[in-house]
Image (cartoon, grey):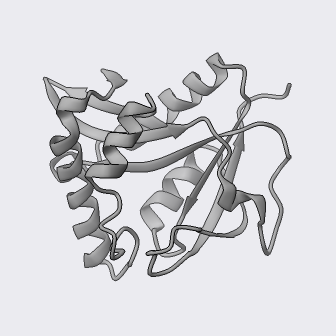
């Protein structure tokens, strides 16, 4: 089952983010290893308060998490070494992660597809995502479900060790 996260699940969700951080570190990536601890209790709580955080639950266990941001991502206003597919309204998927015991079960893909359906329900036909160039698992997932590599964006958060990200976009249907 996929549903919106609740405030009582902040610590459970942060454990999933810790799993992802450990995985990133093990493959030599600095993604999510920033000095501000992002994603952290503050970002998770804010996602829940904005009604943007979704979880995949299996047998009562939260196994995966992702945020669907409905506001424009300021960092996406400038893209380098390419172009977005269009300039239409879009939502953004952020902070997608899976609990380590559930890696390889397709839960990230399931969450992405669910968030695409939620986006369409709102009459929005585009989703944008970014990730580090060496996050090969995420890039493989995005490309396997139809996201197009559009170019390079730079994060605006001040405590990010490496601001460069690859921007992806998917047009969900022609409007």
Which of the pair 158/107 is nearer the observer? 158
- Describe residue 113's horizontal placement relative to residue 47 as left or right: right
Residue 151, image quadrant:
bottom right
Q: Residue at x 50, y 73 (%)?
A: 158
* Image location of residue 6, percent across then percent down: 26, 27
Quarter of the C terminus within the rendering: top right
Residue 145 on image: x %, y %: 58, 43
Q: Residue at x 85, y 46 (%)?
A: 87
Give the residue at x 31% y 29%. 5
Indicate the quadrant containing the N terminus: top left, top right, bottom left or bottom right: top left
Q: Residue at x 84, y 28 (%)?
A: 174
Q: Quadrant of residue 166?
A: bottom right
Q: Can I make out residue 154 in this image?
A: yes
State the residue in front, 99 or 153. Answer: 153
x, y percent for residue 154: 63, 71
Image-based side of 138 in relation to 77, left or right: left
| Residue 106 visible in rendering | no
Picture coordinates of residue 94 (x, y %)? Answer: 48, 49
Asked if residue 152 is positioned above or below residue 118 in the image, the reply reads: below
Q: How many marks?
A: 0
């Amino acid at each position: 089952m996929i549903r919106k996260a609740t405030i009582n699940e902040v610590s459970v969700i942060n454990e999933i983010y810790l799993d992802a951080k450990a995985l990133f570190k093990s493959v030599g990536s600095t993604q999510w290893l920033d000095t501000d601890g992002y994603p952290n209790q503050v970002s998770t709580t804010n996602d829940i308060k904005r009604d943007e955080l979704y979880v995949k639950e299996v047998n009562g266990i939260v196994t995966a998490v992702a945020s669907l941001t409905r506001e424009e991502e300021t960092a996406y206003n400038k893209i380098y070494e390419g172009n977005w597919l269009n300039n239409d309204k879009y939502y953004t998927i952020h902070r997608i992660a899976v609990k380590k015991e559930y890696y390889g079960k397709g839960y990230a893909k399931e969450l992405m597809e669910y968030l695409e359906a939620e986006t369409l329900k709102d009459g929005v036909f585009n989703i944008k995502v970014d990730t580090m160039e060496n996050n090969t698992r995420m890039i493989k997932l995005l490309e396997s479900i139809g996201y197009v590599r559009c170019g390079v964006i730079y994060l605006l958060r001040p405590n990010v060790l490496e601001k460069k990200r690859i921007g992806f976009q998917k047009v969900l249907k022609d409007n």
